Amino acid sequence: MIPHLAEAFTLKSYEQLLQIGLDAGYRFSSFSEPDEFPDGPTCLLRHDIDNELLHCDPMLSVERRLGVRATYFVMLRSSAYNLHCVEALEIIKRIIADGHWLGLHFMGERFENATADEIVSEVRREAAWLETEFGVPVRAVSFHQPSRSIIEGNLEITGLVNTYNRKQLAGYHYMSDSNMDWRGHDPYQALSGRQYWKLQLLIHPMWWTHHPLSLLEKWQSVLRMNTRATTEHWQAREATLRNASVTWQWGEPR
Ligand SMILES: [Zn+2]
Protein backbone atom coordinates (compact mmCIF):
# COMPACT_ATOMS: atom_id res chain seq x y z
CA MET A 1 0.00 0.00 0.00
CA ILE A 2 1.28 3.45 -0.86
CA PRO A 3 0.98 5.67 2.22
CA HIS A 4 -1.04 8.87 1.78
CA LEU A 5 0.90 11.08 -0.65
CA ALA A 6 2.05 13.67 1.88
CA GLU A 7 3.06 10.94 4.34
CA ALA A 8 4.71 8.87 1.65
CA PHE A 9 7.52 11.31 0.94
CA THR A 10 9.21 11.50 4.30
CA LEU A 11 12.64 10.21 5.25
CA LYS A 12 10.93 7.73 7.55
CA SER A 13 8.92 6.26 4.69
CA TYR A 14 12.07 6.23 2.53
CA GLU A 15 13.72 4.12 5.20
CA GLN A 16 10.67 1.83 5.26
CA LEU A 17 10.82 1.51 1.49
CA LEU A 18 14.49 0.48 1.53
CA GLN A 19 13.90 -1.88 4.45
CA ILE A 20 11.06 -3.55 2.53
CA GLY A 21 13.45 -4.01 -0.39
CA LEU A 22 16.16 -5.49 1.84
CA ASP A 23 13.65 -7.82 3.52
CA ALA A 24 12.52 -9.02 0.10
CA GLY A 25 16.12 -9.87 -0.78
CA TYR A 26 16.97 -6.96 -3.08
CA ARG A 27 20.62 -6.12 -3.47
CA PHE A 28 21.77 -2.68 -4.50
CA SER A 29 24.15 -2.56 -7.40
CA SER A 30 26.01 -0.02 -9.53
CA PHE A 31 24.90 0.91 -13.03
CA SER A 32 28.18 -0.39 -14.38
CA GLU A 33 27.44 -3.87 -13.02
CA PRO A 34 23.69 -4.30 -13.40
CA ASP A 35 24.03 -8.08 -13.52
CA GLU A 36 26.34 -8.35 -10.53
CA PHE A 37 23.82 -10.48 -8.61
CA PRO A 38 22.20 -12.87 -11.09
CA ASP A 39 20.72 -15.06 -8.36
CA GLY A 40 18.47 -12.53 -6.72
CA PRO A 41 16.46 -9.36 -7.23
CA THR A 42 18.57 -6.26 -7.92
CA CYS A 43 17.82 -2.59 -7.44
CA LEU A 44 19.78 0.16 -9.17
CA LEU A 45 19.08 3.02 -6.80
CA ARG A 46 19.50 6.34 -8.59
CA HIS A 47 19.51 9.86 -7.21
CA ASP A 48 19.35 12.71 -9.74
CA ILE A 49 20.49 15.84 -7.93
CA ASP A 50 19.03 18.95 -9.55
CA ASN A 51 19.04 21.36 -6.61
CA GLU A 52 19.67 19.75 -3.26
CA LEU A 53 23.31 18.63 -3.33
CA LEU A 54 24.24 20.45 -0.13
CA HIS A 55 21.30 18.91 1.74
CA CYS A 56 21.75 15.20 1.04
CA ASP A 57 22.98 14.32 4.53
CA PRO A 58 19.61 13.10 5.86
CA MET A 59 19.29 10.68 2.92
CA LEU A 60 22.90 9.58 3.35
CA SER A 61 22.18 8.82 7.01
CA VAL A 62 19.26 6.57 6.12
CA GLU A 63 21.31 4.69 3.54
CA ARG A 64 24.30 4.39 5.89
CA ARG A 65 22.09 2.96 8.61
CA LEU A 66 20.74 0.31 6.25
CA GLY A 67 23.96 -0.33 4.35
CA VAL A 68 22.33 0.54 1.04
CA ARG A 69 24.40 1.92 -1.84
CA ALA A 70 23.09 4.30 -4.47
CA THR A 71 24.43 6.25 -7.43
CA TYR A 72 24.39 9.99 -6.89
CA PHE A 73 24.12 11.68 -10.27
CA VAL A 74 25.39 15.24 -9.91
CA MET A 75 25.14 18.17 -12.32
CA LEU A 76 27.94 20.33 -13.60
CA ARG A 77 25.41 22.91 -14.71
CA SER A 78 22.85 23.15 -11.94
CA SER A 79 21.39 26.59 -11.35
CA ALA A 80 21.13 25.78 -7.67
CA TYR A 81 24.59 24.54 -6.67
CA ASN A 82 28.20 24.92 -7.65
CA LEU A 83 30.21 21.69 -7.73
CA HIS A 84 33.43 23.68 -7.30
CA CYS A 85 32.47 25.31 -3.99
CA VAL A 86 33.96 24.01 -0.74
CA GLU A 87 30.59 22.86 0.63
CA ALA A 88 29.95 20.77 -2.49
CA LEU A 89 33.40 19.19 -2.28
CA GLU A 90 32.68 18.19 1.32
CA ILE A 91 29.34 16.53 0.59
CA ILE A 92 30.74 14.69 -2.44
CA LYS A 93 33.54 13.45 -0.21
CA ARG A 94 30.93 12.10 2.22
CA ILE A 95 28.94 10.47 -0.60
CA ILE A 96 32.07 8.68 -1.82
CA ALA A 97 33.24 7.78 1.70
CA ASP A 98 29.87 6.09 2.31
CA GLY A 99 30.53 3.77 -0.62
CA HIS A 100 28.10 5.31 -3.08
CA TRP A 101 28.85 5.69 -6.76
CA LEU A 102 29.14 9.01 -8.55
CA GLY A 103 27.32 9.57 -11.84
CA LEU A 104 26.83 12.51 -14.17
CA HIS A 105 23.44 14.21 -14.32
CA PHE A 106 23.64 15.85 -17.72
CA MET A 107 21.90 19.15 -18.34
CA GLY A 108 21.26 18.99 -22.06
CA GLU A 109 19.39 22.23 -22.55
CA ARG A 110 22.16 23.71 -24.68
CA PHE A 111 22.12 20.64 -26.90
CA GLU A 112 18.51 20.55 -28.00
CA ASN A 113 19.46 20.86 -31.65
CA ALA A 114 22.78 19.07 -31.41
CA THR A 115 23.69 15.85 -33.15
CA ALA A 116 24.07 12.62 -31.19
CA ASP A 117 27.84 12.82 -31.69
CA GLU A 118 27.97 16.31 -30.19
CA ILE A 119 25.97 15.22 -27.14
CA VAL A 120 28.14 12.13 -26.66
CA SER A 121 31.29 14.21 -26.83
CA GLU A 122 30.01 16.73 -24.26
CA VAL A 123 28.83 13.96 -21.90
CA ARG A 124 32.27 12.36 -22.06
CA ARG A 125 33.95 15.69 -21.40
CA GLU A 126 31.79 16.36 -18.31
CA ALA A 127 32.19 12.80 -16.98
CA ALA A 128 35.96 13.05 -17.41
CA TRP A 129 35.95 16.31 -15.45
CA LEU A 130 34.03 14.63 -12.60
CA GLU A 131 36.52 11.76 -12.54
CA THR A 132 39.50 14.08 -12.42
CA GLU A 133 37.98 16.37 -9.83
CA PHE A 134 36.80 13.66 -7.42
CA GLY A 135 39.27 10.87 -8.20
CA VAL A 136 36.66 8.17 -8.68
CA PRO A 137 35.41 6.33 -11.75
CA VAL A 138 32.26 7.80 -13.29
CA ARG A 139 30.54 5.06 -15.24
CA ALA A 140 26.96 6.26 -15.65
CA VAL A 141 25.05 9.24 -16.99
CA SER A 142 21.44 10.26 -16.48
CA PHE A 143 19.91 12.96 -18.63
CA HIS A 144 18.07 15.82 -16.93
CA GLN A 145 14.55 16.26 -18.37
CA PRO A 146 15.44 14.10 -21.36
CA SER A 147 13.84 14.85 -24.70
CA ARG A 148 11.96 12.11 -26.52
CA SER A 149 14.94 11.66 -28.84
CA ILE A 150 17.23 11.06 -25.84
CA ILE A 151 14.81 8.55 -24.30
CA GLU A 152 14.22 6.71 -27.54
CA GLY A 153 17.66 7.24 -29.06
CA ASN A 154 19.46 4.71 -26.83
CA LEU A 155 22.57 6.89 -26.97
CA GLU A 156 25.71 4.87 -26.62
CA ILE A 157 28.61 6.55 -24.87
CA THR A 158 31.85 4.62 -24.59
CA GLY A 159 32.72 3.90 -20.98
CA LEU A 160 29.38 5.05 -19.59
CA VAL A 161 26.00 3.46 -18.96
CA ASN A 162 23.17 5.68 -20.13
CA THR A 163 20.30 5.16 -17.67
CA TYR A 164 17.83 5.50 -20.56
CA ASN A 165 19.58 2.99 -22.79
CA ARG A 166 17.35 -0.06 -22.92
CA LYS A 167 20.06 -2.29 -24.34
CA GLN A 168 22.55 -1.52 -21.58
CA LEU A 169 19.90 -2.01 -18.91
CA ALA A 170 18.03 -4.85 -20.55
CA GLY A 171 15.39 -6.37 -18.29
CA TYR A 172 15.30 -3.40 -15.92
CA HIS A 173 11.99 -1.86 -15.02
CA TYR A 174 12.09 1.90 -14.38
CA MET A 175 10.21 3.58 -11.55
CA SER A 176 10.51 7.24 -10.58
CA ASP A 177 9.26 9.55 -7.84
CA SER A 178 9.29 12.54 -10.23
CA ASN A 179 7.30 15.40 -8.71
CA MET A 180 6.08 13.03 -6.00
CA ASP A 181 4.05 11.10 -8.55
CA TRP A 182 4.70 7.38 -9.02
CA ARG A 183 2.44 7.37 -12.10
CA GLY A 184 0.27 4.56 -10.89
CA HIS A 185 3.10 2.41 -9.57
CA ASP A 186 3.34 1.27 -5.98
CA PRO A 187 7.04 0.98 -5.12
CA TYR A 188 6.27 -0.50 -1.69
CA GLN A 189 4.26 -3.31 -3.24
CA ALA A 190 6.73 -3.73 -6.10
CA LEU A 191 9.60 -4.30 -3.68
CA SER A 192 7.74 -6.40 -1.12
CA GLY A 193 6.29 -8.65 -3.84
CA ARG A 194 9.50 -8.75 -5.89
CA GLN A 195 7.36 -7.53 -8.75
CA TYR A 196 10.42 -6.65 -10.80
CA TRP A 197 13.49 -8.84 -10.50
CA LYS A 198 15.49 -5.91 -11.89
CA LEU A 199 14.44 -2.46 -10.81
CA GLN A 200 15.89 0.96 -11.58
CA LEU A 201 14.48 3.17 -8.82
CA LEU A 202 14.87 6.93 -9.28
CA ILE A 203 14.61 8.83 -6.01
CA HIS A 204 15.08 12.59 -5.87
CA PRO A 205 16.35 13.41 -2.35
CA MET A 206 14.57 16.78 -2.36
CA TRP A 207 11.14 15.13 -2.14
CA TRP A 208 11.98 13.10 0.98
CA THR A 209 11.82 15.43 3.97
CA HIS A 210 11.71 15.04 7.74
CA HIS A 211 8.10 16.23 7.78
CA PRO A 212 5.31 15.93 5.25
CA LEU A 213 5.24 19.00 3.01
CA SER A 214 3.53 19.93 -0.24
CA LEU A 215 5.47 19.96 -3.50
CA LEU A 216 5.70 23.75 -3.44
CA GLU A 217 6.84 23.76 0.20
CA LYS A 218 9.60 21.28 -0.64
CA TRP A 219 10.78 23.51 -3.46
CA GLN A 220 10.74 26.55 -1.20
CA SER A 221 12.53 24.65 1.53
CA VAL A 222 15.43 23.60 -0.72
CA LEU A 223 15.84 27.04 -2.25
CA ARG A 224 15.75 28.62 1.20
CA MET A 225 18.36 26.15 2.48
CA ASN A 226 20.59 27.03 -0.47
CA THR A 227 20.36 30.72 0.41
CA ARG A 228 21.10 29.84 3.98
CA ALA A 229 24.18 27.82 3.01
CA THR A 230 25.46 30.73 0.91
CA THR A 231 24.81 33.20 3.72
CA GLU A 232 26.52 31.01 6.31
CA HIS A 233 29.50 30.57 4.00
CA TRP A 234 30.03 34.32 3.79
CA GLN A 235 29.15 35.01 7.40
CA ALA A 236 32.01 32.70 8.38
CA ARG A 237 34.42 34.53 6.08
CA GLU A 238 33.35 38.16 5.90
CA ALA A 239 33.61 40.28 9.00
CA THR A 240 31.22 42.89 7.61
CA LEU A 241 28.49 40.34 7.17
CA ARG A 242 29.25 38.55 10.43
CA ASN A 243 28.99 41.77 12.42
CA ALA A 244 25.95 43.15 10.66
CA SER A 245 22.96 43.43 12.95
CA VAL A 246 20.83 41.35 10.66
CA THR A 247 18.42 38.73 11.84
CA TRP A 248 18.18 35.96 9.28
CA GLN A 249 14.77 34.34 9.04
CA TRP A 250 14.93 30.81 7.72
CA GLY A 251 11.57 29.41 8.73
CA GLU A 252 11.05 25.77 9.58
CA PRO A 253 14.10 23.51 9.23
CA ARG A 254 13.69 20.72 6.75
ZN1 LIG B 1 17.17 16.25 -13.17
Image (tube, helix red, strand yellow):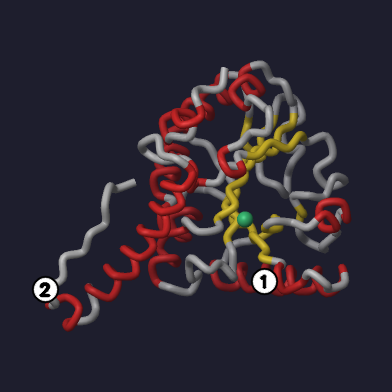
Number of marks in the rendered image: 2
Secondary structure under tag 2 reads: loop
Is residue 222 shown above or below 19? below
In what quadrant does ligand 1 lie? Answer: bottom right
Q: Residues within 10 Å of mark 2 (few under 14, many from 20)?
A: few
Q: Which residue is found at the position 52% from the left and 48% from the top? A: 99
Q: Which mark is residue 126?
A: 1
Pinpoint residue 10: horizontal percent, then vertical percent.
43, 34
Q: Rounded to the nearest whole Å, what is the CA distance between mark 2 and mark 1? A: 42 Å
Q: Residues within 10 Å of mark 1 (few under 14, many from 20)?
A: some
Judged left or right of residue 141, residue 70 is left
Q: Which residue is mark 2?
A: 245
Foreground mark, 2 or 1?
Answer: 2
Secondary structure under tag 1 reads: helix
Q: Which residue is found at the position 82% from the left and 62% from the top? A: 157
Pinpoint residue 176: horizontal percent, then vertical percent.
65, 39
* Amino acid at circle 2: Ser
* Amino acid at circle 1: Glu
Quarter of the picture holding the N terminus: top right
Can I make out residue 141 in this image?
no
Can I make out residue 71 in this image?
yes
Q: Ligand 1: does it lie within 8 Å of the C-beta at label 1?
A: no
Is residue 36 shown above or below 254? above
Q: Which residue is found at the position 20% from the left and 78% from the top? A: 241
The part of the image, by quadrant, that contains residue 186 is top right
Depth check, front residue: 32 or 230: 230
Judged left or right of residue 10, residue 121 is right
The part of the image, by quadrant, that contains residue 49 is bottom right
Pinpoint residue 172: horizontal percent, then vertical percent.
78, 36
